Amino acid sequence: MEIETVGRVLAEARRAGRKLDEYPCARPDMGQAFAIQAAMAVAMGAPVVGWKVGLTSVRAQEICGVDAPLAGPVFDGMVWDSGAEMAPVEGDLGILEAEVGLRMRADLPPRDAPYDRAEVLAAVGEVLPVIEWVNKRLPGGIREAAEWLAADGVINRGLICGAGQGFDPARDLAGERVTVRRDDEALTEGVGANAMGGADAVITWLANDLSARGMGLCQGDVIATGLICDVVHAVPGARFEAEFAGLGSVAVTVAR
């Protein structure tokens, strides 16, 4: 398997907003999958500005058919402000997920010893409302082998971000509630604890997952910590808003 070649294929499809007609190689093992993800990140030729942590909730794991979290990079040019209008691309999954977001104020570089929760939370600067737009470059629907999900950067298209608030490690993000509406219709609601018990657990997991892969979190990185309600589907012409009880709201309009 030519890791760099597969990474380039996935990067080209991501940049073009194109879905592949077939898999670019035989199904990789998990080590190969993360090597492909890294090669894809290099081939993107754009800085990594954040991370999508996916499959942090039982609901997300049920939808995709996997049983553990995974993390993938978010690239410069793929983070939008609340109120953005976005157009689906051909073959787009068009899945929108309301998530608690975090922004780093300090680096957490890779190291031999694991990070504890207090160290990780001390490096977080802001908390913010996020809608993730989920899409994949691979054939088929949302259900996918975990190895392919990892290789494809955990199938994110990008993040729509609302205004940030200063982060307090004592804040109860597990109890943060959200309601997602399409225009004026409430579609789904959830609570922060649905994602691994809360965003603090997710960011601690991520810091150690990246460190084990020889990478780290960087100042300014935006982290989407995972689905906390049900997914909704992008409908052309509709406006979607995730209204959080304490974080404010974030919205995206889907172009016709």
Image: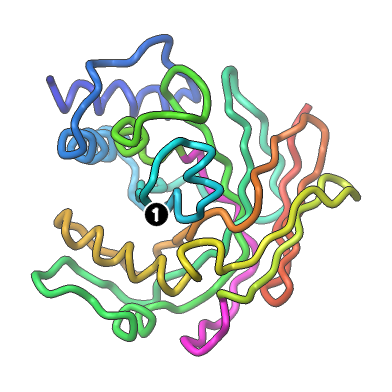
**Residue drawn at x 71%, y 68% as measured from the top left:** 244
Is residue 165 rendered magenta in the image?
yes
| Relative vertical location of residue 122 with respect to residue 139 in this rendering, above or below | below
Q: Residues within 10 Å of mark 1 (few under 14, many from 20)?
A: many
> In terms of image quadrants, where is residue 26?
top left
Is residue 137 left or right of 95 when viewed as pictured? Answer: left
In the rendering, at what x and y percent does residue 98 appear?
Answer: 63, 54
Q: Which residue is mark 1?
A: 51
| Quadrant that contains the N terminus | top left
Colour setting: rainbow
In the rendering, at what x and y percent does residue 202 appear?
Answer: 41, 65
- Closer to the camera, 61 or 232? 61
Residue with the most extreme left position: 112
| Relative vertical location of residue 109 with respect to residue 51 in this rendering, above or below | below
| Relative vertical location of residue 249 with respect to residue 165 in this rendering, above or below | above
**Residue drawn at x 64%, y 68% as measured from the top left:** 163
In the rendering, at what x and y percent does residue 177 appear?
Answer: 69, 69
Is residue 1 left or right of 45 when viewed as pictured? Answer: left
**Residue drawn at x 47%, y 40% as measured from the top left:** 156
Q: Secondary structure at mark 1?
A: strand
In the rendering, at what x and y percent does residue 201 appear?
Answer: 41, 71
Is residue 51 left or right of 33 when viewed as pictured? Answer: right
| Relative vertical location of residue 117 with respect to residue 67 in this rendering, above or below | below
| Quadrant that contains the C terminus | top right
Q: Which residues are magenta?
A: 156-173
Is residue 114 rendered magenta in the image?
no
Residue with the most extreme top position: 21
Q: Amino acid at mark 1?
A: Trp
> In terms of image quadrants, where is residue 109?
bottom left
